Image (cartoon, helix red, strand yellow):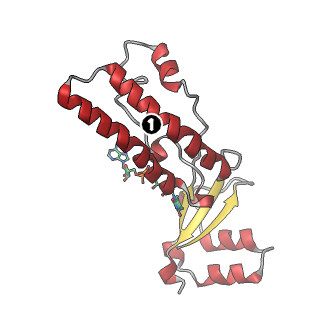
Amino acid sequence: MVGLSWVRSPPTPSIATVKGIKSLMLSHVKSWHPGYSKIIEVVNENDVYIVNARASNPLKKTWRRDAKKKDPSDLCLGNPRIWLLGDAIHPMLPSRGMGANQALHDCADALPQFLKLAEKKRHSKLSEKDFLEAVTAYEEKMMPRSFAWVAKSGGTSQTVCHALHPAESVA
Ligand SMILES: Cc1cc2nc3c(=O)[nH]c(=O)nc-3n(C[C@H](O)[C@H](O)[C@H](O)COP(=O)(O)OP(=O)(O)OC[C@H]3O[C@@H](n4cnc5c(N)ncnc54)[C@H](O)[C@@H]3O)c2cc1C
């Protein structure tokens, strides 16, 4: 895959309105080394697609409690049985290639907690406190690690547009 990223200034038109995506890409690299223009010239325009990357803001450690406070009767808010992993909690710009890596780390941090719950369930009924302790232990590992990568990947400081192309058409 070949990816070209640029900051959306001026704002990039939506994919539906772009006519001649290659021209748009060429206009973005016109002041770059001529090799970049050559790469764009050989790609098949029909295979190019645009991704508007989204990035998250770090959550407070207390986010579940804070959400629950809004309406304690609403089981959807801050429910400790609902665990967030990967892009569901920490989407990041793809510039450092760490989104899926962090999602896999999340699984590694969540799994011991799932196993502990499963073990406890063999002997007794699980309570909300058990779930809250387990998800808190998971989030205490996951949040500093993953949101550090959100920041290192550019945070939300830039809105970036990526034009992508499968590499086999370039070769
Ligand atoms: C251009 C680009 C390049 C990237 N390069 C890298 C890289 O080099 N290295 C890296 O580590 N990461 C990279 N990433 C990031 C990586 O792709 C994501 O971080 C990763 O896929 C997140 O995994 P996930 O399982 O959390 O979410 P996803 O992969 O988005 O999986 C969520 C799944 O849920 C499904 N779904 C959504 N809603 C529902 C619903 N209501 N019901 C049922 N299913 C639903 C979706 O269809 C999807 O299959 C890149 C991302 C982009 C955009």
Q: Position of residue 145 (x, y in %)?
A: 57, 44
Q: Position of residue 20 (x, y in %)?
A: 60, 71
The residue drawn where x is 30% and y is 40% is: 115
Which is more toward the observer, 85 or 25? 85
Residue 135 found in image quarter: top left
Q: Residue furthest right?
A: 31
The residue drawn where x is 41% and y is 12% is: 72
Q: Position of residue 17 (x, y in %)?
A: 57, 59
Residue 19 found in image quarter: bottom right
Which is more toward the observer, 17 or 146? 146
The residue drawn where x is 57% and y is 48% is: 54
* Disc 1 target residue: 138
Instruction: Tell whether 95 sits left or right of 102.
Output: right
Which is more toward the observer, 94 or 134? 134
Indicate the quadrant of ligand 1 in the picture.
Answer: bottom left
Q: Is residue 37 above or below residue 18?
A: below
* Label 1, ligand 1: CB separation under 8 Å: no
Q: Position of residue 8 (x, y in %)?
A: 70, 54
The answer to whether residue 36 is visible is yes
Q: Secondary structure at mark 1?
A: helix
Which is more toward the observer, 136 or 7? 136
Question: Label 1 amino acid?
Answer: Tyr
The answer to whether residue 159 is visible is no
